[in-house]
């Protein structure tokens, strides 16, 4: 008989939660009828964090994807009027990507869909539990090193 693997169980729970979050967000996106895929949604959110329109290479680096993937996402968002390609004022050979008014409106709707999805997921938790979960998630996201003890502490 083997001992239970608590880290393996946690890993499985995290994966299941991630899949559930994606399913719920996708359902809320579809309900809002934005015609935006989750990947396009991520690109729009990323664009909103720049002070000035970024280059495609900047987006690829920030999203941790290959440049070709960004091109495909931008093509789709440009076709729907949510972003536009603009020449760089300092170097006209460089193309930058900027949000349009439709893109900003889509971002507002996306944020509302994300909040609704989060509320659905967090509904079973009391306020105190949400606060504790928030602290735990911050620790995981920030990657704070927590010493791992192989055996009981003395």
Image (spheres, rainbow, N blue to C red):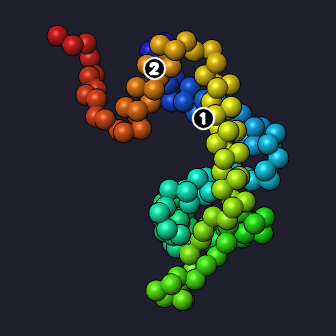
- Pointer 1: what residue? 18
Neighbours of disc 2 within 10 Å: few (<14), some (14-19), many (20+):
few
Marks 2 and 1, how far apart at CA: 19 Å
Classed neighbour count for the residue bearing mark 1: other residues with Cα under 10 Å, few (<14), some (14–19), many (≥20): few
Residue 152 visible in the shown view:
yes
Question: N-terminal of the two: label 2 or label 1?
Answer: 1
Secondary structure under tag 1 reads helix
Tell which residue pokes out farthest to the left in this image. Answer: 154
Q: Is residue 116 left or right of residue 54?
A: right
Horizontal and vertical percent position of residue 79: 78, 69
| Residue visible at 62% across and 57% down in the picture | 44
**Residue at the location (75% across, 43% down)?**
29
Q: Which of 38 and 88 lies nearest the eye of the viewer? A: 88
Q: Nearer the viewer, residue 117 or 148?
A: 117
State the residue position of label 2. 131
- Any part of residue 2 in sight: no
> Between 86 and 122, which is closer to the camera in this rendering?
86
Look at discs 2 and 1 and give the one toward the viewer: 2
Q: Position of residue 104 (x, y in %)?
A: 66, 56
Q: Is residue 31 above or below residue 135?
A: below
Question: Which of the numbered marks, if any, corresponds to residue 68?
Answer: none
Q: Is residue 106 above or below residue 2?
A: below
Horizontal and vertical percent position of residue 64: 50, 59
Tell me the residue at 60%/22% (across/down).
122
Placement of the C terminus among the 4 image quadrants: top left
């Amino acid at each position: 008989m083997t001992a239970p693997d608590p880290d393996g169980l946690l890993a499985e729970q995290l994966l299941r939660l991630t899949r559930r979050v994606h399913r719920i967000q996708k359902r809320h996106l579809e309900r809002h009828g934005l015609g935006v895929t989750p990947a396009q949604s991520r690109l729009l959110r990323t664009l909103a964090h720049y002070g000035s329109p970024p280059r495609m290479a900047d987006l690829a680096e920030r999203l941790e994807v290959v440049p070709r993937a960004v091109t495909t996402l931008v093509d789709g968002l440009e076709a729907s009027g949510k972003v536009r390609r603009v020449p760089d004022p300092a170097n006209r050979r460089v193309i930058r990507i900027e949000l349009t008014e439709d893109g900003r409106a889509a971002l507002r709707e996306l944020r509302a869909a994300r909040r609704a999805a989060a509320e659905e997921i967090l509904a079973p938790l009391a306020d105190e539990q949400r606060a504790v979960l928030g602290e735990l998630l911050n620790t995981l996201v920030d990657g704070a090193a927590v010493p791992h003890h192989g055996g009981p502490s003395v």
